Amino acid sequence: AAMTFHGHCVLTFNIHKGADRKGNYHLERTIDAIAYLGVDLIGLQEAMRNHPDFNCDDQPALIAEGLRRRTGRPWLPASLKKPGSVSG
């Protein structure tokens, strides 16, 4: 069951590229943790896209889809890049 907050809840979360404490890639566990917290908006750090070490997954999109399935709420991934940065 998700935690309950009143008003809007914002979370920043360094997901360490979707790896658990032992370094094993486990994005579903990350999604479960976010869903449990019952947040409204999430700022992710170290979320990867198209990296060969992480199955070339689009982690923001997978997290959004996993949260939709778990919460029944709409979730949309969005990316912000610094001017001149290279996507990756």
Image (spheres, rainbow, N blue to C red):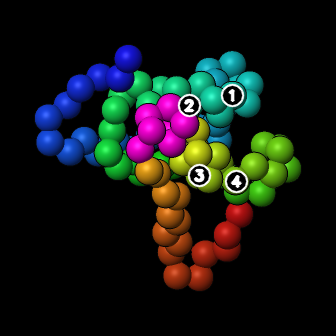
Would residue 26 be counted in the magenta stretch? Answer: no
Which quarter of the figure is the N terminus placed in? top left
Q: Which residue is mark 3?
A: 60
Residue at (48, 26) in percent of width and height:
33
Q: CA distance from mark 3 to mark 1?
A: 14 Å
Amino acid carrying label 1: it is His
Where disc 4 sits, the SS reads loop
Which comes sooner in the sequence, label 2 or label 4?
A: 2
Amino acid carrying label 4: it is Asp
Residue at (69, 19) in percent of width and height:
22
Q: Which residue is mark 2?
A: 30
Q: Which residue is mark 1?
A: 26
Q: CA distance from mark 2 to mark 4?
A: 14 Å
Q: Nearer the viewer, residue 82 or 59?
A: 59
Q: CA distance from mark 3 to mark 2?
A: 11 Å
Q: Which residue is mark 4?
A: 58
Where disc 1 sits, the SS reads loop
Would residue 68 be counted in the magenta stretch? Answer: yes
Give the left or right position of residue 85, taking residue 82 as reference. right
Which quarter of the figure is the C terminus placed in? bottom right
* Mark 2: few/some/many CA within 10 Å (<14, 14-19, 20+): many
* Mark 1: few/some/many CA within 10 Å (<14, 14-19, 20+): some
Residue 16 in percent (x, y) is at 59, 38
Residue 79 — which label?
none
